[in-house]
Image (cartoon, rainbow, N blue to C red):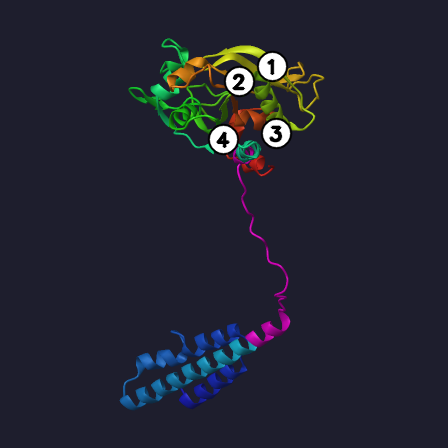
Amino acid sequence: MDPKALENEARSAIAGASTLSELDEARVRYLGRKSELKQALREVRDPETGRILNSLREELEEQVAVRRGELEREDLDRRLTEEVLDVTLPGQARPRGHLHLITQIRREVEDVFLGLGYSVVDGREVETTHYNFDGLNFPADHPARSPLQSVFLNGDVLLRTETSPSQIRVMEQQPPPIYMVSLGRVYRRDTPDATHTPVFHQVEGLAIDRGITMGDLKGTLLHMMRALFGEEREMRFRTHDFPFTEPSLEPDVSCFLCDGVGCHVCRFSGWIEIAGSGMVDPALFEFVGLDPEEWSGFAFGMGLERVAMLRHGLPALGMLWENDLRLLSQF
């Protein structure tokens, strides 16, 4: 092998490389493991020849590094010239989440009653039978007290079946007048179907003052229903029986889909059952030490999932708990 001829040939190939790939090919050809130079270095027998070949190898490696730097700068200059980027254009916005439909409805309800001067109370999700049943005038043999219907944790401790226990606690803690709503999760041993889930959300309201009448209850509920379902909504009331109210009423709202004519949503009746309500039973006043001859009041309760189902035409309550973005992103 003639070192001088190899040096000239390699220099020419390195300098003539116009792209990084061509330079890499030249590097492999003259400095790779199978190159003529590397083979000669393996067979060297005298120090002088070894020194000459190593010097040639180092020089060619330096030439490759210099040429690589030149080509990289040329490539950068070309890209800066040809690949124009308008930095003033807006970027791709990341999709943002939003409040769950149930949370949206909860806040709507809160706003309705804050506007009426009510306070919003956060109750306990873990309660005792003293507040969940005794304070609400549930008789000892009421089915709701059974472990088959309520979720008991230990003895008389259970997950609340409604948000009403917070009303008893507020009545114990402050004297009337009381105007409050309590919203949150409640738990029952319900078999999941189109209209029932074991966990759901409720809003329950309580008003206690002197001279409160059934007319105040009806007017308050009508105001709430029109705020949630539209100003054209009408209401009707049917008698019912609840342990904590006497007399008790079940309010129906005129169907928002057919305007009372009759459709599949209202089961062709023109009306939709929406809540439970009534005048506070005197036994509740006595339980907290209030005189039922001096004070009167009304209470009501309604499921927030039911509002979402009826207002948006959802076929089943469970859809709100599946976290399917195809559904939730619509609201």
Q: Which residue is mark 4?
A: 321
Q: Would you say the magenta stretch is mainly helix, strand or loop?
A: loop
Distance from disc 1 to disc 3, alpha carbons, whole Å, reads: 18 Å
- Residue 73 seen anywhere in this rendered image of the structure: yes
- Which tag, 2 or 1, sits closer to the chain's start? 1
Distance from disc 2 to disc 3, alpha carbons, whole Å, reads: 17 Å
The amino acid pointed to by label 1 is Phe
Residue placed most toward the observer, 36 or 141 = 141
Residue 29 x, y percent position in the rendering: 45, 76
Element under label 1?
strand
Span colored in magenta: 76-105
Residue 209 x, y percent position in the rendering: 50, 23
- Which tag, 1 or 3, sits closer to the chain's start? 3
Q: Which residue is mark 3?
A: 228
Crowd rating for badge 3 (residues with CA inside 10 Å; few <14, some 14–19, many 20+): some
Crowd rating for badge 2 (residues with CA inside 10 Å; few <14, some 14–19, many 20+): many
Distance from disc 3 to disc 4, alpha carbons, whole Å, reads: 21 Å
State yes or no: discs 1 and 4 in contact (Cβ < 8 Å): no
The image quadrant where one finds the C terminus is top right
